[in-house]
Image (cartoon, rainbow, N blue to C red):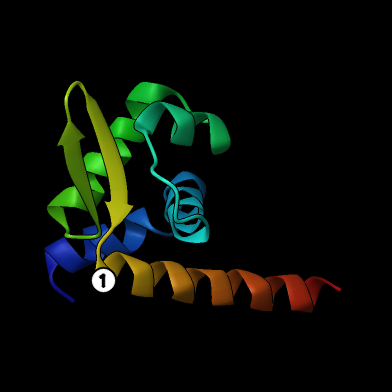
Amino acid sequence: MGAKKKKLFSNFLRKKPTKILINLNNDSKLRYASVLAKEVDCTYSHTVRILNTMEKNNLVKFDKKGRLKTISLTPTGKKIANHLSQVINLFNDVEK
């Protein structure tokens, strides 16, 4: 596995990036970094850093409308979010 893929892989084994992806995938409404930060119980600056990493890896895209930036998943980001949801569900089933 290349260094870039290892970094990407290790990033999504963390709680906050996983929550961000899943929350973006769960609702189709427009999302802002500040709202997303509150939803995943994370600081705004940390959320933005995570989102910038995700954007560099083509998982999310930012759409600027005036002064506001909305965030949405790319098709690749949706696939990963769906798979992460499945993994979480499997762990939840094991814990029962």
For image coordinates 44% across by 48% down, the residue present is 29
Near-viewer residue (12 or 52): 52
Is residue 77 something that shows in the picture?
yes
Q: Position of residue 93 (x, y in %)?
A: 77, 77
Which residue extends farthest right? 96
Give the amino acid type for the residue marked by disc 1 in the picture. Thr
Near-viewer residue (48 or 7): 48
Q: Quadrant of the N terminus?
A: bottom left
Instruction: Say above or below: 5 vs 55.
Output: below
Which residue extends farthest front? 66
Q: Position of residue 55 (x, y in %)?
A: 19, 50
Instruction: Say above or below: 14 vs 51.
Output: below
For image coordinates 39% across by 23% down, the residue present is 44
Q: Is residue 12 left or right of residue 38?
A: left
**Picture quadrant where residue 31 is located:** top left
Q: Position of residue 89 (x, y in %)?
A: 66, 73
Q: Position of residue 77 (x, y in %)?
A: 31, 65
Q: Quadrant of the C terminus?
A: bottom right
Q: Residues within 10 Å of mark 1 (few under 14, many from 20)?
A: few
For image coordinates 55% across by 69% down, the residue present is 85
Near-viewer residue (80 or 13): 80
Q: Which residue is mark 1?
A: 76
* Number of on-image labels: 1
For image coordinates 39% across by 58% down, the residue present is 12
Q: Is residue 90 left or right of residue 83?
A: right
Look at the numbered disc 1 and give the secondary structure of its residue: helix
Q: Is residue 66 left or right of residue 15?
A: left
